[in-house]
Image (cartoon, helix red, strand yellow):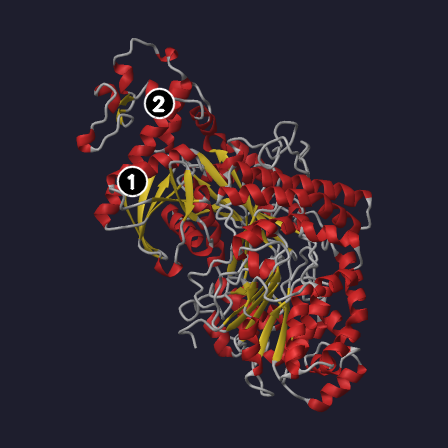
Amino acid sequence: MSPANVMMHRSNSRPLLDVSRAVIQANSEDRNPTILLPNQSDDISHLALDIGGSLIKLVYFSRHEEHQSNGDMKKKSLNLKLEIPNALHRRNYPVLGGRLHFVKFETRKINECLDFISSKQLHYGGIDSPRVNQQFDANIVIKATGGGAYKFADLFKEKLGISIDKKDEMDCLVAGANFLLKAIRGEAFTHMEGQKEFVHIDKNDLFPYLLVNIGSGVSMIKVDGDGKFERVSGTNVGGGTYLGLGKLLTKCKSFDELLELTQRGNNSNVDMLVGDIYGGLNYSKIGLSASAIASSFGKTISDNKELSDYNPEDISLALLRMISYNIGQISYLIALREGLKRIFFGGFFIRGHAYTMDTISFAVDYWSKGQSKAMFLRHEGFLGAIGAFMSYEKHGLDDLMAHQLVERFPTCSPYMIEKTSNPSLIDLNEKISWIEKFMQKSIEITAPVPMTIPGTTGIGGFDSPSSRGNKLRSDGSAKLFNIGVLHLVPTLEVFPLLADPNTYDPDTIDLSELNELKYWLPVLSEHLPDLVDKAVASEGGTDDAKRRGDAFARAFSSHLARLMEEPAAYGKFGLANLLELREECLREFHFKDAYVTIKKRENEACLAVLPDLLMELDSMNEEGRLHSIIEGALAANIFDWGSRACVNLYHKGTIIDIYRMSRKKMHRPWQVDDYDLFKERMLVCGSNQPYKRALLFVDNSGADVVLGMLPLAREFLQRGTEVVLVGNSLPALNDVTANELPGIVAEAAKHCDIIRKAAKAGGLLVDVMATQDSSKEKSNSVPLMVVENGCGSPCIDFRQVSSELATVAKDADLVILEGMGRSLHTNFNARFKCDTLKLAMVKNQRLAEKLVKGNIYDCVCRFEPAASGIF
């Protein structure tokens, strides 16, 4: 297909959905998730519904007008030399686009749903859409699935003047489930006796499985692949049964009201238990405990009571248990008949309700004799709505992809266009990464949340906002949607040097361990006042900045309180996720770089003394110089504004004073000391090149990068090794970013010929002299590069790095991870296909004891040869 044909085809179709880098985000109004579509530029009116017998699930698009561009002309020459497409060289977000919001209504209140659509003008693309002021468009079509798509089609036409494109319910359910299970880490989990455990799903080994969707009724679908499925069974006893009987028996008016009653119920008051029959004893011969239900509602047979004599709470719980148990039992029997090992449960009947999941799990476990486990989906209620929404992209997606290739890469070959426009030739999701985040701009919070830890209020001292008009109440309804923001980022890839991506886990600290949670949540809470002060100062200390700073602190404290109350609320959550959540909250309240002033001041101070340090290093012999450089890198890592102990040091002297003090205390052996192994590898080749390309993952600004990592980079350059300085894509604490590194290198180059020549060749110096030199050399050699890592956190997850980093890593034979976040909090146990050097000063006493059996300010110099069997 030629570029002209691509554009002609697209111009004759309706506006298309750009799902690149989509984001699901919680809605502050109703706690339902939304999806950001940051690349969407067309004025579209995509609206999708799943209209069931009990509930309507609605998905709609709204415009998102935040644009942030950090394009860097200095990087273009590097990208050309490395053949990295310009569209992939810089991760820009958020940019022009929008969000997909998820909302639910009871089906009996469909007029409220129609009023909601009308009030927001969703069928015209939203209130801000130019189409709102245009004449009535008789051709507006929305996607909908479920029985209501047929039942209410005329009503939608009559009230809103829109037509419904009816999508098959099973198609949508399966498409939504397959998407979630493949794309979202921690989507599936088990739930037994109140304990939630997340299940790793290999997307290459997903099929076959049984999907049990519990809506008003229950459908059981055998899924053999994408678009390959069969409804193999079902039952008419489902969510509609629970709500219907519950209304008759308890006078409750809603599903959520019924679930609320169960929290205070005791089903043994109405259910006949095994113990009731056997005088309180177990029926051990057939494995039934005394507490097992022999007959649901059986105890009411012999009771001489009227309905009004029973507690609604007991009735609601007994009813929930009866229906949940039977669904679990039938599901297992169908899975057994079909030869299926995996059973996933979804649908709004579950609603993340612990007792419901425990009951289903018990049934599956009991009847399978422990051989099968019930697994649940975190986005359980939106399977059909997600599938219906995804059906928009099927209309012209292939042509749109080809069109975008032509726009972004005009020199791409016709074969590439043809290959991309044919799904059978290429996996369109091959290099797409989905990231779940839980940021919330909860500006409406009014209840006070402490930023410091009172010593007398128990674990953490957290006080979750409760009643005074806030929107983060810790009640039953809020817990129904423990799902966050899913960022769809095509420019993130798996780091190619991971020894085994399938078993890689970045987190060293797992917050599912209660003791870890009890320690780290207060630590982050104690750090909040200082962080807020820095954030407000970075914005000039204005009243608006103070207001946003206070709102950020309360919002983040609410997240901490929620995690303390329910550790698994946000899925499988490690310390790295918690630190990133903090940074995302800062960005959500428009604090772009809380430490920008401090970083600038510390960089200038350290650059001023760099020439003296380099002169001192040059006076040493080779072995002494290498030792001094590693020693200096460890000493300089003391500067970390994320550490309370280190922050206290800053009040005792200047940055140079502290650096010198740290150097004086750098006595070997260090707590983890593999320096001799690294020295042997570096010096064994003599003057020959020890490594071809080294990736240096730098940490903090100031002394850490200027006096620690730049001398190390310079040492490699002297030995003929290509050096890649890897910095954050976005600010996090005082970490140096990829945007800041070229400026730091340029300043250092003024005092060092080695750095200056390498920086010129790498395109990091753009001035008249550099331009003249580069035009003479005309070399493709890139001895010194700066690339971004693809994240905005003190830690790094190597399952999702920038395409730029993934490209340069393919030729690297050494990885250096520097700093606590990158080499201790994460990746301390990670193995790579190449040699790895992990450098850090431990600035937390608990971490020192746990990881290295040492003390605060102990040092880690861990050298690991390439994972055996890789090379």
Residue under circle 2? 267
Numbered circle sitting on residue 364: 1
| Image position, residue 630 (x, y; %) | 64, 71
| Image position, residue 537 (x, y; %) | 79, 50
Residue 707 as seen in the image, left or right of residue 173: right
Provide the secondary structure element on which disc 1 rests.
helix
Provide the secondary structure element on which disc 2 rests.
helix
Name the residue rendered at 65%, 82% in the picture.
622
Does 526 appear above or below 326?
A: below
Residue 730 picture quarter: bottom right
What's the amino acid at mark 2? Asn
Disc 1 to disc 2, C-alpha distance: 20 Å
**Residue found at the very far top of the displayed protein:** 304
Numbered circle sitting on residue 767: none
Report if residue 161 is visible in the image.
no
| Image position, residue 806 (x, y; %) | 54, 70
Residue 228 as seen in the image, left or right of residue 750: left
